[in-house]
Image (cartoon, rainbow, N blue to C red):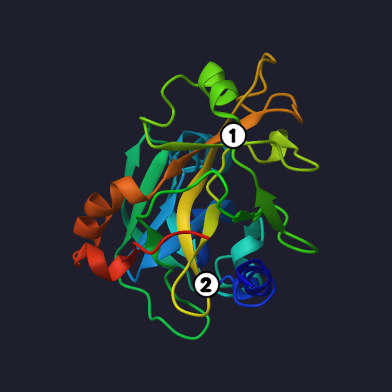
Amino acid sequence: DVTTQQQKIVSSNLASTKFIAGLFWSSSTGLHRRCAATIVANNVLLTSASCALDKYPNLAFGPGQWVVVTSGDSRFTQNLTASAVQPSAVKSVDIDQCANLATITLTTPLVLSDTIKPILMNTAQVPPTAMLNTYNTSNPYGSPFLALTQGNQQQCETMKPQFAQDKFICTQPVQGQFITSDYLGGDPIIGFSVQGATPVAVLVGITGQFYSTLVNAQNGGINDPTAFRFSALVGSRVSQIASTAGVDALTLTSANPLG
């Protein structure tokens, strides 16, 4: 049973979150977590453009630079001392604000291991019935995995016209949604590629911005538990990401149908 197998993946393989790192602002006051960054190659990670803009951390914590933390629970810790971890230096951040996607390139490639591994990016179509989950890295303890349901096409078009043509996925509100603490996005959206007897976890998208009829809800000023979310699909950006990584796109992707 595919659904049962998928649920087992959520509770076992994904629980290790080997592909999730933390994007931190490094300044004279220490390391300050901004959001998640998903490892798609040993030298490339993805997050949302809204996460990777350096204006706010520069103002809040002083001049500094982006670094990536891949080790253990430190990835999810809001503030760290510089001596607590050995972060990876960021070479560049390519920000596509139209897609709300940021591609992070590291100065030195990660040493991959049993606890640090990239996730394949999905290039197959995402059917309305596809089983999708995200990992709420702003609250990673307890039950951080959230099941996502795609929104009604007409409702989504009302909030963000041509979202599908612009390669976004629209998802309905999740239980306990509190957008004032999650308005930046940047978390991975995981699907399950049907490949042989066991579905394989693949990266479908990166969580993006909320769209709401309430004033100030979209920028996190107030909460709207009914807001829909529009997130970047990674499949249409694979060529650019592979070029940045300096590898063949086929080594980073899965084209198998989603279950």
Where residue 199 is drawn, which disc sits there?
A: 2
Q: Earlier in the sequence, mark 2 or mark 1?
A: 2
Q: Amino acid at mark 2?
A: Pro
Residue 34 shown left or right of residue 123 in the figure: right
Percent coordinates x, y for residue 100 in the rendering: 42, 36
Residue 240 shown left or right of residue 163 in the figure: left
Confirm whether residue 234 shows in the render.
yes
Confirm whether residue 30 shows in the render.
no
Percent coordinates x, y for residue 147 in the rendering: 68, 52
Q: Is residue 55 above or below residue 243?
A: above
Please name the residue shown 80% across and 42% down the image.
176
Please name the residue shown 59% across and 22% down the image.
155
Percent coordinates x, y for residue 203 in the rendering: 46, 59
Mark 1 — residue?
A: 229
Question: Where is the N terminus found, in terms of image quarters?
Answer: bottom right
Residue 172: which quarter of the image?
A: top right
